[in-house]
Amino acid sequence: MRHLSAVEGCGALAAVSPDSLSSNVRPITAEAAVEALARSVLEVMAGARDIDQLARWVTADVFATLRNRVRVSTQARLAHGVRRHRPILRFGRVHIAEPSPGIVEAVVVVHGRGRSRGVAVRLETVRGRWRASALHIL
């Protein structure tokens, strides 16, 4: 069985086997990793989290696309006089597929106060760490 793990003090996800876990690595399920990434991305878009905190979780292409989307969200928030806030989010069931070893594709519906969004993500193992190589927020 493969687990996703978060190394203490670092914003990266690592692919590890349960036998190789040390005291500074805690396993998390794929569902928890997808929820954590989706929550972080939506917090970045709401202005509650700095985008640089996601750099180690996503590939360069995903980061560039996300940076543009955050810029547009910030402009819209300023134009409408909406303040930065940490959104209150409720997650639906995470649906996961593993098309091949080291690759996880998942989708989750995230419910906010006045809006629900779908988040689709593809996590791939890169140098022993899970990174989002595709991320779509609907």
Image (cartoon, grey):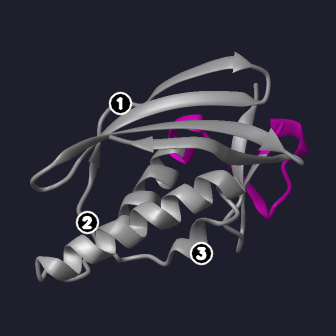
Please name the amino acid that badge 1 sits on: Arg
Q: Residue 58 lies in what quarter of the image?
A: bottom right
Q: Amino acid at mark 3?
A: Asp
Badge 3 density bin: few <14, some 14–19, many ≥20, Cα 10 Å = few
Residue 17: in magenta span: yes
Q: Is residue 42 visible?
A: yes
Residue holding disc 2: 87
The quadrant in which the N terminus is found is top right
| Crowd band around label 2 with a 10 angstrom C-alpha radius: few (<14), some (14–19), many (20+) | some
Q: Residue at x 64, y 46 (%)?
A: 132
Which residue is the site of mark 3?
52
Front: mark 2 or 3: 3
Q: Label 2 is placed on what type of residue?
A: Pro
Q: Position of residue 16 (x, y in %)?
A: 82, 41
- Label 1 residue SS: loop
Q: Which residue is mark 1?
A: 93
- Residue lying at the far top in this picture: please name it: 99
Q: Which residues are magenta?
A: 15-33
Disc with the residue nearer the chain's start (1 vs 3): 3
